Image (cartoon, rainbow, N blue to C red):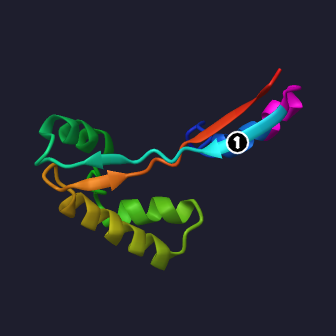
Amino acid sequence: MKRTGKDGNIGLKLPLLFQQLGLREVQCRQSDKVHVSNPQVNPEDAAKLYKALAFPDPGDPRTFTSQLQERGMSREEAERQYAAEKLLSIAYTASVPMTYAPSMKITFGTV
């Protein structure tokens, strides 16, 4: 959040924020929706999902790992993360069938 201004944990914080704002019976659930992409069955939908989830090449390994280390990873962890993301950028193509579960949080309460 300090680096980008975006809070990637907002979904976990919303139930407490809702309670602090006065909502009652606050609940938070996790969506169980799974996206299925099979290019052989539905190439148009598969292309949309691929574009939304494309794993770009992580670029220069030194730059990538140093940025992760600045955020608290050890050198070894950063190198493993680079290797994993590099492999994904190579292996994941528009022709690969896949499933994706975004793990979206749904928070609600009574005013």
The quadrant of the rendering that contains the C terminus is top right
Measuring 34% from the left and 69% from the top, which residue is drawn there?
A: 84
Q: How far across and how far down the image is residue 85, in percent?
A: 33, 63
Q: Secondary structure at mark 1?
A: strand
Measuring 21% from the left and 36% from the top, which residue is drawn there?
A: 45
Q: Is residue 65 left or right of residue 51?
A: right
Q: Would you name the residue on which mark 1 appears?
A: 28
Q: Is residue 67 visible in the rendered structure shown here? A: yes
Decide which of 64, 42 is in the foreground and name it: 42
Extreme-top residue of the structure: 111
Measuring 41% from the left and 68% from the top, which residue is drawn there?
A: 81
Query: Which portion, as a residue range, is magenta?
Result: 16-24
Q: How far across and how far down the image is residue 41, in percent?
A: 13, 45
Measuring 14% from the left and 47% from the top, which residue is drawn there?
A: 39
Decide which of 33, 104 is in the foreground and name it: 33
Q: Amino acid at mark 1?
A: Cys
Decide which of 72, 97 is in the foreground and name it: 97
